[in-house]
Amino acid sequence: MGMTESQSTWIMSAFQLTFASFLLISGRISDVYNPKIGFVSGVSGLGIISLCAGLVDDTIPLIILRALTGIASSMTIPSALALLVNVFPEPLEQARAIGIYGGCACIGNSLGLMIGAMFVQWASYHWVFWFVAIVAMPAALACAFIIPPEISKTKDNLEPAAAKWKSLDLLGVTILTVALILFIFAVTSGSTDGWASAAVLVPLIISIMMVIGFFYWETRIHVDTAAIPPRTWFYPNFSILFAVALLPLLWWFTVFIIFTTLWQNVLEWSVISSAVHMLPLGVAAFIMSFTGSLSRIFSPKWIILTGMFFCMVATVLLALGGGKPEDYWPYVFPAFSLGSAGVMLTYTHTNIAIFQAAPSSMAGTVGAIFNGALEFGSAIGLAAVSSIETSVEAIHGGSHEYKGRAAVFWFLLAVVSILFISVSIFYDRSTDHTPQPEHGDPGHPARRSTDSDEKLNDVNGTMIEKANLANLPV
């Protein structure tokens, strides 16, 4: 298509920018309205937009359609997780379901990589988008009939339309969405336009100020109408689990980008060959996705730390070797297998633990926060990775040498090590395997009041003090 380097970057970044930015509003819609509607709308929108993208031959319209694809995709993730939490309320079943959900994502990524490579190699890139449409549109139609309406009810389904509208916190969500768009735009542009340019610094500073303004706004409105109530960050282990969620996509995306560019641009491997050599990432991750039930036997803390340890060992292997074809079996293959297994362990059990840490009535919002952390970690990390690699290669032999890539993996090792230490210190095991908190109280699960109790008391006009509320049965 004759794209410039900047344009090719935005083909990927446009999707990431809108996907991450619209996760929160999608999560709020899933919690306040009906997650089934959000899921079916997102999947059908993805199919229609992909069909249109396959008909486009110009760069700018394709970037715009990729951005719209990100919005449609953002509607599917929080709603899918909200549906899973409603379908599987029992903790063990819920853990297994969330684990398998992550495994399906790995299979989708691996198969998508292979199928996309075959289309690019033997047909055209248009078929990549058309294939998505062929899969998505029948899937949306099937889900519209298969998903029963009773499992898609939320705590606010019976409230009047005006109450639902207010519960969306449109002002807060709009502030955060614009802030995230500016932030990801600045971070993405930094690697191409330079970090000192006005096009990077201005949106970066504005986005930080808007994020501060968002959190201030959330403290000023009623807790039941806030998009992210301040108490959310005080649920047991929620903050440290959010920090851990910054890691998985950062590790996977870094490995993927580093080795696809190395194999195709330096070693001149074909697209198919590169995709086949990437398969250990998907296979190892898929196997680990079935470990969800372990979180009910062992503390998630130990499982997450084990996954991080595997990731650290794999990252050291990649830092020591991988720049030559003969390095694949002694260094790259074991690192791909061990590292992807470790990252999937971390991803799966962080996902399970963060849903157990917050009330089920916040499932859509929690899913948005978790997946937003995944995207922000990859965006910020990849910007740092690109800068490190470019800086080292400018001094040590250019892109044909492995030293820049090795420096990236040493940086990645430092990131994983910091998170490993943080989880070791700050993760509190005292709340493991305790009942999931109810809506309205970040305290100990045994002392949480129920949302229905609060509504009943509101109807009767009785004001109950927190001390008395603590004695009500959960």
Image (cartoon, rainbow, N blue to C red):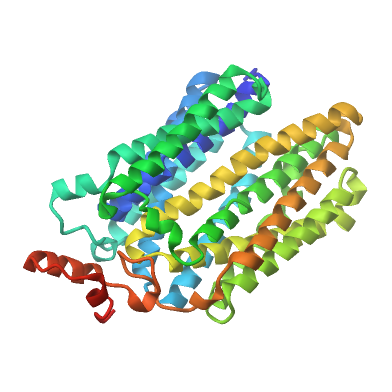
Observer-nearest of 291 and 28:
28
**Quarter-wise, where is residue 448 in the image?**
bottom left
Q: From the image, which quarter does the N terminus lie in? A: top right
In this picture, is 188 found above or below 22?
above
Q: How many marks overall? A: 0
Name the residue furthest left: 460
Residue shown at the point (27%, 72%) measured from the top left: 449
Residue 47 shows up from this direction: no
Residue shown at the point (62%, 38%) measured from the top left: 119
Q: Is residue 326 left or right of residue 208?
A: right
Residue 24 shows up from this direction: yes
The image position of residue 410, as x and y in percent, is 81, 48
**Quarter-wise, where is residue 397 in the image?**
top right
Observer-nearest of 277 and 88:
88
The image position of residue 295, as x and y in percent, is 55, 75
Residue shown at the point (73%, 32%) measured from the top left: 387
The image position of residue 19, as x and y in percent, is 47, 40
Residue shown at the point (63%, 61%) measured from the top left: 344
The image position of residue 239, as x and y in percent, is 51, 58
Q: From the image, which quarter does the C terminus lie in? A: bottom left
Observer-nearest of 384 and 220:
220
Observer-nearest of 463 and 17:
463
